Image (cartoon, rainbow, N blue to C red):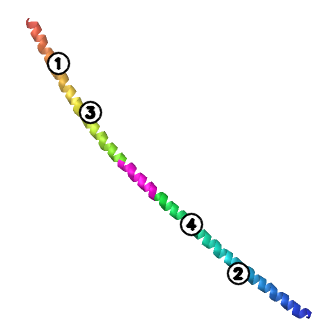
Amino acid sequence: MSDGSTGRIVAALERLEAQVAQTATRDDVAKLRADLMARMDRLQSRMDSLDEHLTMGLGHTDQVDQRSRVATQAVLEDNRLLGEQVTSLHKLIRMLEARVNQLEDRQ
């Protein structure tokens, strides 16, 4: 073989190596892209699940808060009514005490 043909063979081999390297790089990029997309899908799925869980939890919290407010209002109303009853009983006791005092004064 002559030096000219050897040079051409070496140049062809170098071009072939460059093409193989470029193809391998493309394959690596494609694999990396597919891997990243799969990871992003898994993360999105986990985020959706977490979002659903939190939404359900917050909905439950809202229900508990609403029930608590209703119960608090009921207790406040019961306390108000009880206060009115105590006030009425207190007035009645004062009236009875005044009558007893009047009866004792007559005797």
Looking at the image, which residue is at 10% across and 11% down? Answer: 102
In this image, 45 relative to 95: left or right? right
**Closer to the camera in the image, 102 or 5:** 5
The span from disc 1 to disc 3 (Cα, nearest Å) is 22 Å
Say whether disc 2 or disc 4 marks the residue closer to the N-terminus.
Answer: 2
Q: Residues within 10 Å of mark 4 (few under 14, many from 20)?
A: few
Q: Amino acid at mark 2?
A: Thr
Q: Nearer the viewer, mark 4 or mark 3?
A: 4
Q: Are marks 4 and 1 in contact (CB under 8 Å)?
A: no
Q: Position of residue 62 (x, y in %)?
A: 37, 50
Residue 94 disc label: 1
Say whether disc 4 or disc 1 marks the residue closer to the N-terminus.
Answer: 4
Residue 40 disc label: 4
- Report which residue position mark 3 lands on: 79
Magenta-span inclusion, residue 55: yes
Write the start and end of the magenta stretch as one range.
52-63
